[in-house]
């Protein structure tokens, strides 16, 4: 399955949007711009890949 990930990075947070190959939104979330936030998006993307 092909997904595309868009990131909007600021000093406080990161807005994440994942689209599938048909341009449908799979998920969208806002995470903190720190290590726990990065771990959160990593976990979300790995779950989508399964």
Image: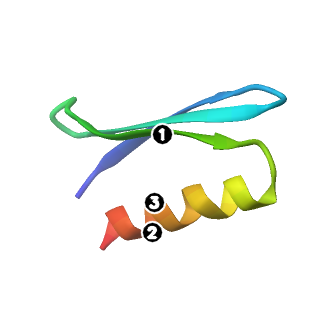
Residue 29 got which mark?
A: 1
Graded by Cα atoms within 10 Å as few (under 14), some (14 to 19) or many (20 or more), the crowding at tag 1 reads few
- Residue 17 position in % (x across, y down): 43, 35
Q: CA distance from mark 1 to mark 2?
A: 15 Å
User: Vertical placement of 33 versus 22: above or below?
Assistant: below
Q: Image check: 43 left or right of 25?
A: right
Q: CA distance from mark 3 to mark 2?
A: 4 Å
Helix, strand or loop status at disc 2: helix
Q: Image check: 40 left or right of 33?
A: left
The C terminus - image quarter: bottom left
Graded by Cα atoms within 10 Å as few (under 14), some (14 to 19) or many (20 or more), the crowding at tag 2 reads few
- Residue 39 position in % (x across, y down): 66, 64
Residue 46 got which mark?
A: 2
Residue depicted at x 21% and y 39%: 21
Residue depicted at x 19% and y 32%: 24
Labelled pair 1, 3 in contact (Cβ < 8 Å): no
Residue sticking out furthest to the bottom = 50
User: Vertical placement of 9 versus 4: above or below?
Assistant: above
Mark 1 or mark 2: which comes first in sequence? 1
Residue depicted at x 56% and y 55%: 41
Residue 38 got which mark?
A: none
Q: In this figure, which colouring scheme has been used for the structure?
A: rainbow
Q: CA distance from mark 1 to mark 3?
A: 12 Å
Say which quarter of the image contains residue 26. Answer: top left
Labelled pair 3, 2 in contact (Cβ < 8 Å): yes
Q: Which residue is mark 3?
A: 45
- Residue 33 position in % (x across, y down): 77, 42
């Amino acid at each position: 399955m092909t997904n595309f990930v868009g990131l909007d990075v600021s000093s406080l947070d990161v807005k994440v949007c994942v689209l599938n190959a048909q341009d449908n939104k799979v998920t969208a979330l806002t995470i903190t711009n720190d290590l726990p936030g990065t771990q959160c998006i990593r976990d979300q993307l790995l779950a989508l890949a399964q």
